[in-house]
Amino acid sequence: MKQLYQQAIELLKKLISTPSISRQEEKTADIIEEFLKSKDFEVKRKHNNVWAEHIIDKSKPIVLLNSHHDTVKPVSSWTRKPYHPDIEHNKLFGLGSNDAGASLVSLMMAFVYLSKQKSTSYDYIFLASAEEEVSGVNGISSVLPIFEKIDFAIVGEPTCMNMAIAEKGLMVLDCTAKGKAGHAARDEGINAISIAVDDIKTLENYQFEKSSELLGNVKLTVSQINAGTQHNVVPETCNFVVDVRTNEHYSNKEVCEIIDKLLKSDVKARSFRLNSSSIPMTHEIVKKGLDLGLKPEIKEGIKIYIALLK
């Protein structure tokens, strides 16, 4: 176990040193593929998703161990060099060290360890997925249909070793208010901004009927707006973006249909696929986590996470 621990640290340092911005993860995918091959696994790859399987008895439940190896871009406010894996006071710093490199190497070493055991109650698949930070179509969603079956998944993310048992869904709406162009000096035209403002006020005041004990209310946030071509022209269109976080009582499609009926603006969803998800408190792995002293928590992200159990 100590050897796997040291290998995890060295692998994480190597991954941090290698830029892996979402959709540009080729080099870290190469590193992960090389490491798994060095452990004598048959490694498979699609796009920048890399996985290995330990399936001995197909009658056993199959557990997916998954985390992602892409990162966001480093911001200008970084006080450290993002691609320098520095260890200070027993802490490892660097872009992706926490989200989600630590989870990734921990799950990978757990997979290596479990696969070497003579007898286990489960079979395992380890998947290092790509494009997680952008919910990309060439990420995990492009790989899951390949697997014959998955009975359960543990997805690693920074949760302070708590179990994330539920999360809101995510949907992005592109809305377009349509008016009529005119000259600002004359009493003509229909200002699309005014239509958009009315719609935005409607969204701010609207309350969805069904609230959730775990996730609360459906949340609507207008996060972007754009209109106008020059100061003296009444804008004929105004575009605004709505960030929608749904609870388990509504599908994303249902929420989109409700909003579409509320607004004068045209409403178009970018995707319906990221619905709310949760795992029951009565599930055996949640109960096991509680026995180990882990706490359940709610994630505001885009997938359900179950923290890696020690």
Image (cartoon, helix red, strand yellow):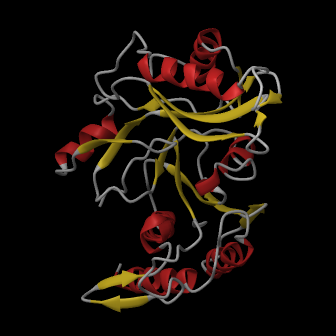
Residue 114: quarter of image = bottom left
Position of 32 with respect to 96 (left or right) is: right
- Residue 104 visible (yes or no): no
Please give left or right for residue 41 compared with residue 212 in the image.
right
The x, y position of residue 205, in whole percent, is 42, 18
Measured from the top left, where is residue 5 in percent x and y?
A: 38, 80
Q: Please tell me in which quadrant of the rendered image residue 69 appears.
A: bottom right
176 is higher (above) or lower (below) than 139: above
Q: Which image quarter is the C terminus in?
A: bottom left
Judging depth in this view, the residue of 136 and 176 nearest the camera is 176
Res 274 seen here: yes
Query: As rendered, which of 58 and 110 lies closer to the eye?
Result: 110
Identity of the residue drawn at 37% across and 57% down: 308
* Front position in the image: 250 or 139: 250
**Residue 290 percent location from the top left of the image:** 20, 43
Q: Residue at x 66, y 60 (%)?
A: 130
Please tell me which residue lies in front, 79 or 67. Answer: 79
